[in-house]
Amino acid sequence: MIEEFRLPDLGEGLTESEIVAWHVAVGDTVALNQVIGEVETAKAVVELPSPFAGTVTAITHEPGTTVEVGEVIIAFEVEGAAGASGPDAEAPQKRVPTLVGYGADPESSSRPARRARAFAGAPATTTTTTGAASAPAGLPAVLPAVLPETPPAPSARVQADRPRSTPPVRKLARDMGINLELLAGSGERGLITRGDVVAFAGDRPHGAGTPVAVPASSVLPARTAGDAAREVRTPIKGVRKFTAAAMVQSAFTAPHVTEFLTVDVTAGMEFLARLRGSRAFADVKLTPLTLAAKAVCIGIARQPSLNSRWDEAAQEIVTMNYVNLGIAAATPRGLIVPNIKDAQALGMHGLAEAIGGLSATARSGKTPPQDLAGGTFSITNIGVFGIDAGTPILNPGEAGILALGAVRNTPWEYQGGIALRQVMTLSLSFDHRLVDGEQGSRFLADVGAVMADPAMALALS
Amino acid sequence: MSKLTLTQAINAGLRKAMEDDPKVVLLGEDIGTLGGVFRVTDGLMKDFGSHRVIDTPLAESAIIGTAVGLAYRGYRPVCEIQFDGFIYPGFDQIVSQVAKLHVRTHGKVTMPLTIRVPFGGGIGSPEHHSESPEAYFVHTSGLRVISASNPQDAYTMLRQAIACDDPVLFFEPKRRYHSKGEVDLDADLSRAPAMGAARVVSAGTDATLVTYGPLVPTALDAAKAAADDGVSLEVIDLRSLSPIDYAPIVESVRRTGRLVVTHEASETLGLGAEIVAAVTERCFNYLEAAPVRVTGFDIPYPPSKLEKHHLPDLDRILDGVDRVLGRPNSLSGLEG
Amino acid sequence: MLDTSSDSGPQPGIHQIIAADGTLHADEVLSPFVADVSDEQLVQLYRDMVVIRRIDTEATALQRQGQLALWPPMLGQEASQIGSVRALEEDDFIFPTYRENGVAYCRGADLAGIMSTWRGTANTGWDPHEFNMATPQIIIGAQTLHATGYAMGLTMDGKESLSIAYLGDGATSQGDVHESMVFAASFQAPVIFFCQNNHWAISEPVGLQAHSPIAGRAPGYGIPSLRVDGNDVLAVLAATRWAGARARSGGGPSFIEAVTYRMGAHTTADDPTRYRGVTELEEWGAKDPIARVRALLTARGKLDAGREAEIAGQADAVAAELRAACINLPDPDPMALFDNVYTGDHAILDRQRDHFARYLAGFAATESATTTLEGSRS
């Protein structure tokens, strides 16, 4: 078989040499290491020992020519199998030897590419996978026994594993007042993701005293005749678990008192109708809720205790000088309570706009997390369900919540007689640690006064 | 049980090792007649002879290099480097020879050397006597690196180091040489905690405080002061720097969610950097706050009048603890 | 540059027995130590030198052919290596540099083991305890401390054997060499410092390392010293026996400066024409260690054409064995990366080993996983 000899690099990073002389000719028999020629480097003439024993079949460069390192200069006919007597003829000697070794890999001109991987889900290109990487499947059997990621410490003090999440998601949950203990994580090995927290916040209903739109996930199967089960068991977890815990925490931490005030809001409704007719309010939707929102802000200004917070850890009551007014809203998953930041600074138009925006966003399920955090007082409109009154449970962390009942045509005292008037019941629950009976009552009276006669807003501000 | 100083415990450990194995020989400057500048080898030359407790000429590279030759010959040398700052002349023999000979010879030649190094500051000395060079050696594969913080650990870990067939650097916190502690001199070595094991020295729930060597007592003091403040710190003594025993650290951080590492050595590329990186990799989904390092500054060790500002103390450690707990601290409000 | 006079007779202060032209001289100090050497034994020394030169030639060719990463030639230093190694007992321990491949061969090192260092399949290739020779040392001078420590251990053990540290002229500038002489003298360790002054440390001439003869350094430490013609195998043999006798009888350390010449390059990719002239090579070529013994033996009728051919044939056979051993060295398994770093478990390393195994297992088995470097396949 034919073996080719390529010009080797002779040191110092030279890339070419000049053939000075051949000591053999085509047809000559050559012994291993026999000097077959001489080449000249920059400074010296170097002998070339033959790497093969065989017969010269071709000399490809004549003396006097300059040859690049790696080019074939002479070929031999040798006996025996390939690979036993020299470097692979296919691979030109590309690494340039240095004083101390083979030398560095040459730079490649071809496009860089990854080696083919053997496991399912391995990316075909160099793009990275998003989110948590899935464990490789289908590894060859040669894989050594799997070592645990970290051997679990055999400590008797270890409690149940804390919820696993990432630092940024923990902060989000903290800001939203959500306890990660109660979430089920959808990420790898139960990791709680940002999506889990946001979805969870969307599921959190508001107040146990109000009927809750039952989330689809916990719809009971329709009762069937015959061999249907007498009882159905649904695991306590996720949304319902958190909701329950929040209600419990609220109900059994803050002493709730609820007061009722039924008011003739006919004048208030007429006022709203008048506003609706004006051009300035043509672009917004005005409802009793809008008026109630304004009334609440006015009432809070006069009774700030309704807008405070009990800080147990610091042993302080925090009274906010801003009102982040939560408005209960229906979403595909149930009720959420996004809040309007700094509602006290908004006029009727601003409030109407904000309420409209909150509702629309909530209906489409796109309420951002910051809208759900930081509320200071809430309003829930149970009137839309045709209900008059209730005993709403406080949003945890808030001092008061106002439920608006339906507006009904009711026989009512009017100018000394009985007339059909538009009547609404206001139900106010408050935290008796933060709000005295007198304060709560005065607040409710103020709110009712504005609802009954919007001009009272001027008198009370 | 005996109440011994750290120095006495090390002395007892050397004595026991030499009694148990005639191949154990000590080499170092001033270790024989004088008994060592810290009296760590006091009395040993008298009892074991000058052929086993060898006063060497003043040459650190040779102390290590001849120990290599002795190891070839089947001895188990224990070298003393008189002060941390003087280890550098021997650095080449340690990293190029001691650390590599086992792998170089496919395991045919072992280097069961122990190199004892008094290290760390807080002793009011001039330059080169208060260094913390441990990171260079932790970074050198083929070496094991340990540091005992108390007399009992010093006694058992030194004996384990000498018995270990791998080369071991034994860093002795010199400012704790006079600290006393109970030592069980009859402790069965095979039942003692492994040389490579870290230990939770004080249990807690709010944050994990990891350290080694001279700062372990400081960390324990910090934990006591923190308790008065309503903060429960879990203090872990690394004991082994190469390898680091991550199991108890990870278990702790998964519970507390908060990590503070403290050491005298400079911040950049100190052991704190390695521990924070490794714990973040293993506990990312359990972390409540970014881990905090409380360390010496990136400066050559300062003059003794300034060293108290350079060395982490109780206050600086607790400032770091405040930071990891999200409480007001000296860097509150500072971005990054 | 040191005086490289072409006078073939003994130089002032340099002990010699066989002159460059093959004639014998009596040397007061050395001759008694080789009085027992028969002609037949001299033929064996000649054979040794021919064989190791042939090994050197073959290894150089193998590097030229891409089969070795590099090779440090010992061309011209055969007498220094053979003369010294043949003076040692089996239980003497040798601490070489990286150039003593002739010594290793004579001690019984496996050819594949010798080649593995230079091919890159292993850091080093033999068990030091098998024939009492440490593996090649690349840190210049470091081995002199190891030899000294070993010798201290011999004293502690009450043995009559010795250790020998090979070192070059360049090494005598390194601190470790001087520290080893301090320790050797202080502890009267039975160690031989065998310095081959081959005149060059890569491109730096010995005059840069020493302003006076190297042999003059040791007495400053209290260590007796001999300066010998390193190209004279009998002088080297004698000097090593002299030092050995001192060591074995409690006389402590000795220093030998064998004055020789590195006829080849520092390593096979070095170009000596950049720093030394042709004249020097010719001068030293005239002092060839093998040629002079050939002349001596031929004059004595102990070396005819037949004997020469037989010796050359043996040398060729060893060379062929060397070539085959080199080319057939298998590339190490990737997982060998983690072997022997420690004698026991090391949790961090064990974890890395496990992770790397998983990584490798993740590749489709379409190609060899053992190498991605071109040119390193054989």
Image: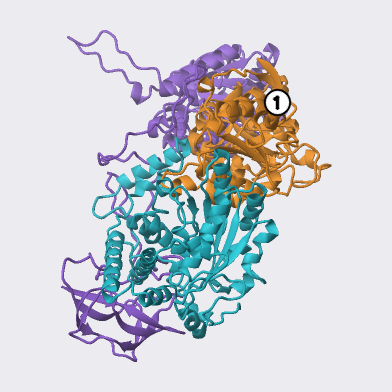
Q: Nearer the viewer, residue A283 or A184?
A: A184
Among the 4 quarters of the image, the one containing residue C51: bottom left
Quadrant of the image containing the N terminus of chain C: bottom right
C353 lies above or below A152 = below
Q: Is residue A295 visible?
A: no
A197 lies above or below B336 = above
Q: Nearer the viewer, residue B40 or C107?
A: C107
**Disc 1 residue type?**
Gln
| Disc 1 chain ID | B
Give the mark count. 1
Q: Nearer the viewer, residue B187 or B309?
A: B187
Query: Where residue C97 sits in the image (x, y, percent)?
Result: 50, 59
Q: Chain drawn cyan, letter?
A: C
Among the 4 quarters of the image, the one containing residue C316: bottom left
Quadrant of the image containing the C terminus of chain C: bottom left
Query: Where residue A56 sits in the image (x, y, percent)?
Result: 20, 81
Query: Where residue C47 sits in the image (x, y, percent)?
Result: 35, 66
User: As drawn, is A58 to the left or to the right of B133?
Assistant: left
Mark 1 nearby-residue class (10 Å; few <14, some 14–19, many ≥20): many
Determine which residue is flagged by label 1. B8
Q: Chain drawn orange, letter?
A: B
What hue does chain A carry in this figure? purple
User: As drawn, is B17 to the left or to the right of C327?
Assistant: right
User: As drawn, is A49 to the left or to the right of A269?
Assistant: left
A136 lies above or below A253 = below
